[in-house]
Amino acid sequence: MSGDIKDVKIAAAIMAGGKSSRMAGQHKGMLLTPEGVTFTERLSAEMHKLTDLVYISYGDTTPMQAEGCVIVRDIYKGCGPVGGLHAVLTRAAEDGAAAVAVAACDMPYVTADLYRYLYARLAERTGIKEYQSNPFELYDGAVAVTGGKIHPLAAVYSVGAAGICKTQLEESNLRLREALGKLRILYVDLEGTAYERMLLNINTEEDYKEYITGRSRST
């Protein structure tokens, strides 16, 4: 076993359960790239470079489907990112995966290499080459950080993290960062790396206009 993500059975999930309220009601996963494909389709293509097991996390509606992706519904309805993460981790465990690479649907620059990098840092920290084991036995995940900001939906999580998410949901605590605080997380600082720009989120109509015209702000 080496420090390569292909050494574990991994699933991937596009987190698309948000209401897109700041996009005038248009679902962010359906926004188009300059190449004319939706954000969801582009992310699907990247995630399929990691695994054949790719989910799209939705709440009650299905804004769109993508070829080769499985729709996963929230088990605990209306509970935001914690609910979505719990659902995909639970499904991945049922499908025999050890971990899930997650990406928010409004991150148009994300590539598969981001998750390879996060996993490599996780394997490096756990001494995987010598330890000859699964780094997710020692950590619950690797989460991207830049400029002191945590990006919990640009991360790789062990399926075992579903238990903490479930506890939070049963306590009606929807704060994802509090869930992270109860997990063994490796925070990977991407500032100054080639991966930093991948953390850009398109949150508003103005963000989208800047993205389309090539004037996207940095993270």
Image (cartoon, rainbow, N blue to C red):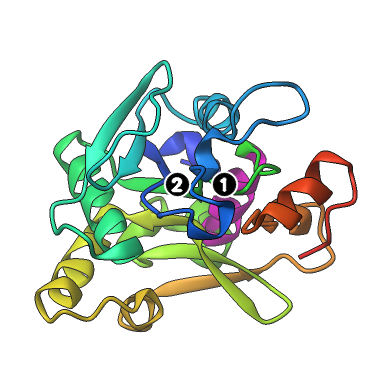
Prevailing secondary structure class for the magenta stretch in the rendered image: helix
Residue drawn at (56%, 60%) of the image: 22
Q: Farthest residue in the left direction?
A: 170
Residue 148 in the image: state x and y as whole percent. 67, 82
* Of 115 and 169, the residue lying toward us: 169
Magenta segment range?
113-123
Going from N to C along the chain, the mark reached first, 1 or 2, is 2
144 to the left or right of 52: right
Q: Position of residue 34 (x, y in %)?
A: 78, 28
**Residue 9 visible, this angle:** no
Q: Which mark is residue 101?
A: 2
At x 83%, y 50%, the residue is 210
Look at mark 1 in the image and give the residue it sits on: 115
Disc 2 residue crowd, few under 14, some 14–19, many 20+, Cα 10 Å: many
Q: What kind of element bears circle 1? A: helix
Residue 119 highlighted magenta (yes or no): yes
**Callout 2 amino acid:** Ala
Residue 169's quadrant in the figure?
bottom left
Q: Position of residue 140 (x, y in %)?
A: 35, 65
Label 2 SS: strand
